[in-house]
Image (spheres, helix red, strand yellow):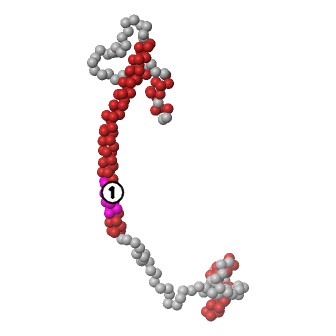
């Protein structure tokens, strides 16, 4: 029987293979005592040097049992409590959302009421501006058509007694071209 030393070189392995095959190492190895084998590490044919490294062995009595059970520290809230906190936060968030939607709806209604209350004032200003422009157009028409016989200034275009709002071209026909373009396309210049 032979013993492999703690050497990993190829020479030791080759000698061990020769010893196992019935070479000289086995004959010499049988003559050595167990104490000599322990002291030298491996004595095959006497040509190897003794190993200086002591092999690491298990403690007497063996190692203790390996604890393989899951042993994680308990940290934080349990799953049920985290679920409860999540549901509570969602309920609180929906409550705030519904409250804000109600407030936003109230503010929107207030804006609409303000617009509705200002609408007659804005319409009256628009009507005054339209009537002023129509009067200026009539004065301009008197100056332009004074030499035309049979021309009636301010004659209605439509044969009706109802009020017909004048179109932009009718109001701005006698105005400078820049004023007409500003009225028609004024907001488009800034967009």
Residue 93: say if magenta: yes
Quick check: can you spot residue 84? yes
Q: Is residue 99 left or right of residue 29?
A: left
What residue lies at 68% left-to-right and 78% top-to-bottom? 9
Q: Can you name the residue that lies furthest to the top here?
A: 149
Q: Is residue 18 visible?
A: no
Q: Is residue 55 above or below residue 105?
A: below
The percent position of residue 4, horizontal first and vertical second, equals 62, 83
Q: Which residues are the magenta region? A: 87-99
- What is the secondary structure assignment of the residue under circle 1? helix
What residue occupies the far right of the structure in this picture? 47
Q: Nearer the viewer, residue 35 or 72?
A: 72
Instruction: Please report the residue visible at 30 percent of the width from the left and 51 percent of the height from the top.
Output: 102
For label 1, the crowd category at 10 Å Cα-Cα, with few meaning under 14, some 14 to 19 and many 20 or more, is few
Judge from the rendering whether residue 146 lies leftward or rightward of residue 22; answer left or right.
left
Q: Which residue is mark 1?
A: 96
Looking at the magenta stretch, what is its main secondary structure?
Answer: helix
Task: Residue 121 in the image: state x and y as whole percent.
Answer: 33, 34
Residue closest to the eye, 190 or 29: 190
Viewer-nearest residue: 18 or 100: 100
Percent across and percent down for residue 15 are 67, 81
Viewer-proximal residue among 109 and 3: 109
Q: Measured along the vertical axis of the image, is residue 3 above or below residue 180?
A: below
**Does 180 appear in magenta?**
no
Residue drawn at x 33%, y 43% is 111
């Amino acid at each position: 029987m032979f013993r492999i030393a703690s050497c990993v070189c190829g020479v030791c392995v080759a000698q061990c293979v020769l010893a196992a095959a019935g070479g000289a190492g086995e004959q010499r190895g049988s003559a050595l005592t167990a104490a000599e084998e322990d002291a030298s590490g491996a004595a095959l044919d006497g040509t190897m040097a003794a190993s200086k490294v002591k092999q690491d062995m298990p403690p007497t009595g063996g190692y203790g049992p390996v604890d393989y059970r899951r042993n994680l520290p308990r940290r934080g809230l349990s799953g049920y409590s985290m679920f409860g906190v999540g549901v509570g936060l969602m309920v609180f968030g929906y409550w705030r959302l519904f409250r804000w939607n109600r407030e936003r709806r109230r503010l929107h209604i207030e804006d609409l009421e303000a617009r509705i209350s200002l609408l007659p004032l804005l319409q009256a200003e628009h009507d005054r501006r339209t009537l002023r422009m129509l009067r200026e157009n009539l004065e301009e028409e008197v100056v332009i058509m004074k030499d035309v016989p049979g021309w009636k200034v301010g004659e209605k275009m439509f044969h009706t007694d109802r009020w017909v709002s004048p179109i932009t071209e009718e109001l701005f026909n006698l105005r400078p071209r820049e004023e007409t373009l500003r009225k028609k396309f004024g907001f488009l210049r800034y967009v």
